[in-house]
Amino acid sequence: DKGEYRHFMLKEIHEQPRVIQATMEGRLTDSRVLEQSLGTEAGSLLAGIRHVQIIACGTSYHAGMVARYWIEELAGIPCSVEVASEYRYRHHVVQPDTLFLTISQSGETADTLAALRQAKEAGFRAALAVCNVPGSSLVRESDLVIMTQAGPEIGVASTKAFTTQLTALLIFTLALARHNGLDSEKEADIVRALREVPRQVDQVLSLDGRIESLSRAFMDKSHSLFLGRGAMFPVALEGALKLKEISYIHAEAYPAGELKHGPLALVDSEMPVVTVAPNNALMEKLKSNLEEVRARGGELFVFADGQSGLHEEDHVHVMSIPEVHPITAPIVYTVPLQLLSYHVAVLKGTDVDQPRNLAKSVTVE
Ligand code: M6R
């Protein structure tokens, strides 16, 4: 039931504060992660892990890409991420003490499942799944499971599944990091930041009207570019995926530093450029990338916080996002991009919940 909402996608976008909260429920105290809540064997499985191999598809793969930044930064453990359909068909080297981590909303994605089945023969230390569907094949076949609490997701375009995956992955990262020397003060700092996320997402949802106005600029465009740096690069990838799948506008995401290495050649007044820019250590570098776009007549749409020093000018639209902790920023900054693509699709009159050619669960290769 869509209730008061016009589409399931919009309903699911608005459910995020609640389902992110539900995904944290029982897994955190005020200052730490309760490792036991991830499973009684979680402690013994995580101790001694020296490497993490993440496998997923589509949106879930983007969640894995964000997790890599967290795992390497907080746990100090090398982490590789790959799409399942590539991983399963190539020769790969399994390093000792590697945790095999799959991420899937449905738990039935054919390539992800096949990769897991292969991994079980290949000498991984353990298989962990982050999944949204209890009793799914992925859940049944993994050693340890962290359930997201998104509830059923009906819209083909994944929204709440992604932000709850990120929430679960950050909780997992903190548990893993504690085995690898993360100090309790830093853990407490991030746990507090995580607890703020539902409220911050709620604040972003209240920008809906302004984002809807911005969306008009995309209606008659055929191409768009999404930029981000660091853990915001996968957020840009996810924003571009949302726009292409429901509005059918060609959208490409690039790490902002790659602009000069090719895509800048595409930028002109017909190319809207969307940037996710929390005020982190990479802000100054990002600003010069934005200048490169502006100088070529590109129309910029920047999602940034008030401290960024970015302001509205000709061809630069700045949408102010609440100040967030750099670690949790990928979760919060995903939401305005979901709203943007939703409104563009509604304006274009596409079938938002059932985009052409796509299925909710890809159970065949
Ligand atoms: O169920 P899964 O998370 O394994 O599905 C993987 C992809 O098919 C999925 O994330 C897809 O990319 C999204 N529905 C796109 O919005």
Image (cartoon, rainbow, N blue to C red):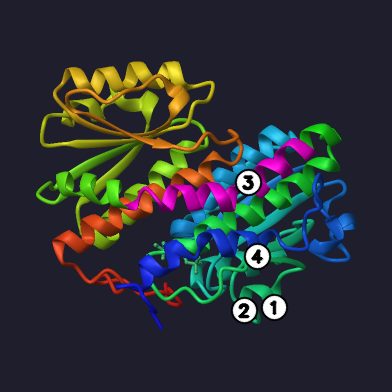
What residue is disc 1 on?
A: 140
Magenta segment: 188-208
Q: Residue at x 22, y 55 (%)?
A: 344
Q: Are marks 4 and 2 in contact (CB under 8 Å)?
A: no
Q: Marks 1/3: CA distance?
A: 33 Å
Identify residue for label 3: 196
Bin the neighbour count of mark 2 within 10 Å (Cα to Cα): few under 14, some 14-19, many 20 and up.
some
Q: What is the x, y in percent for residue 323?
A: 52, 34
**View quadrant of ligand 1:** bottom left
Can residue 127 be seen by looking at this rendering? yes
- Please state, as top left, top right, bottom left or bottom right, where the N terminus lies in the image: bottom left
Q: Amino acid at mark 1?
A: Arg
Q: Are marks 4 and 3 in contact (CB under 8 Å)?
A: no
**Quarter assignment of residue 120:** bottom right
Q: Position of residue 56 (x, y in %)?
A: 53, 59
**Three-letter amino acid code at disc 2?**
Ser
Mark-to-mark CA distance, 1 and 4: 22 Å
For residue 128: magenta? no
Nearer the N terminus, badge 2 or badge 3? 2
Label 4's element?
A: helix
Judge left or right: residue 235 versus residue 33.
Answer: left
Secondary element at image label 2: helix
| Quadrant of residue 190 within the rendered picture | top right
The residue tagged 4 is 22
How far is mark 1 from mark 2, CA to CA? 5 Å
- Viewer-closest of 164 and 90: 164
Give me the C-alpha separation between circle 4 and circle 3. 13 Å
Q: Disc 2 and disc 3: Cα gap in Å?
A: 33 Å
Tell me, for residue 137, which label it has, or none.
2
- Give the foreground label among 4 and 3: 3
Q: Residue at x 23, y 26 (%)?
A: 264
